[in-house]
Image: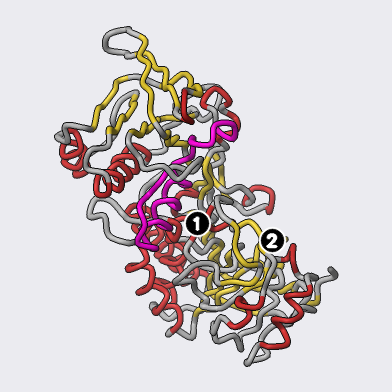
Amino acid sequence: MTPTKSKTLECDLMVIGGGIAGITAAVEAAEMGRSVMLVEKEHYLGGQVARMHRYFPKLCPPLCGMEINFRRIKNNTLITALTGAAPAKIASAGSGYQVEVMVEPRFVTEACTACGDCEKVCTVEAPDAFNMGLTRAKAIRLPYEMAYPYRYYVDKSAVQHPSLQAAAKICPAQAIDLSMQPLLTTVKTKAVVWAAGWQSYDAAKLPELGFDVLLNVVTNLQFERIAANAILANNKIVRPSDGAPLASVAFVQCAGSRDDNHLPYCSAVCCMASLKQSRYIREQYPDAEIHIFFIDARTPGRWEDFYVNVQDDPKTIVHRGKVGKIEAADNSNLTIIAENTLTGNLERVTVGMAILAVGMEPVRGAKELGLPLAFDKYGFAYRNGAANVMPAGVAAGPKDVAASVQEATGSVALALSAIGRSI
């Protein structure tokens, strides 16, 4: 499709990435009186945090905090959020930057009331990316239950399907426009915050761990969606292959991390994430056997108490050793093979399901766009002389949600300080 062009827009700050760091940066800047353009590639804000079932250590739903931020965005006229959008070109323009932003068609206009009538008549499904491809969903749908903007979108792979034409006809708000084209928007901004976030390391690069071959091997982020979907529907968490209850589960730490052949670094949050997920299982299955395979447990500071509490669970067994292989066993079970680094013995444990704690990789693109940032050998960004361009969140290095929020606030303060000096 040939993009149409919009008029040139202007703002004080462009935030690239609509996860928790980007949302924080946008809200903080706008509440200081600065105009903000928030650019997010998905058709919703929230990033990876929106996929989480619960935060640690309180184990409360992250969408509680997100809802407050979404309300702050909705009620602040200084914030313009472009979803389904990504920067295509960035060039210096005086003391600031000119950014070309490509906005992909949503095929649903702002007139949408999210009544759901269109979804009822839609008969075509597509893989649900929000659920990490674990499920399929109607081709016209809300991205997730508390999405912002709270508006349906059409999966572009199904735009030509007849049931979408039928959905367009019955929409009471006449909000479905299947002829939408991409929009190329030029934005002049005084400063940029790069908060593009992270993605999970590709577990398919770890064939010894059976991902994509053994149905009951999933990643930590996939398990987050499995748990969230089950509990939201008042169901129990079950294993993917056959819907069987979870009698025994293994958490495989450092899957591809701290490994010169994959990710040489520690992603900082994986140990706590797995300990948290072990509690999801324990809440529903008091007698389940939970095995956690660590190189070492990295739960610094206040997180140590959480780790100690998990260790006190008599049916949670902590193994000191990195898993070298996962094999198929009888009845769709799995055999976990690991060397115990304390004893030197080879351990073999049979479980019903394995969860791989794969690491965090930065979403790339800033270097290719020519943003004046520096990058370490792993692709994480850091400041490089230009005071009005700052990285924030996991784009600058692995960290948890609290640290991402703190860093985003600091990045905005520095960027706005630079804008003040340039006026």
Left or right placement of residue 4 versus residue 397 in this view:
right
SS under mark 1: strand
Few, some or many residues within 10 Å of mark 1 (<14, 14–19, 20+): many
Front-most of residues 168 and 152: 168
Residue 101 in which image quadrant? bottom right
Q: Amino acid at mark 2?
A: Ile
Residue 67 coordinates in the image, percent (x, y): 38, 73
Q: Amino acid at mark 1?
A: Met
| Residue at the limit of the structure toward the front, as seen here | 331
The residue stretch that appears in magenta: 211-238
Residue 198 coordinates in the image, percent (x, y): 51, 48
Left or right placement of residue 17 versus residue 281 in this view:
right
Q: Is residue 235 magenta?
A: yes
Relative vertical location of residue 62 with respect to residue 140 in this rendering, above or below = above
Q: Residue placed at 43% from the left, 22% from the top?
A: 335
Residue 334 visible, this angle: yes
CA–CA distance in space, label 1 to label 2: 15 Å
Relative vertical location of residue 102 with respect to residue 368 in this rendering, above or below = below
Residue 298 in which image quadrant? top left
Relative vertical location of residue 335 with respect to residue 216 in this rendering, above or below = above
Few, some or many residues within 10 Å of mark 2 (<14, 14–19, 20+): some
Residue 365 coordinates in the image, percent (x, y): 64, 50
Residue 95 visible, this angle: no
Residue 90 is tagged as 2
Left or right placement of residue 282 versus residue 86 in this view:
left
Residue of label 1: 390
Relative vertical location of residue 180 with respect to residue 97 in this rendering, above or below = below
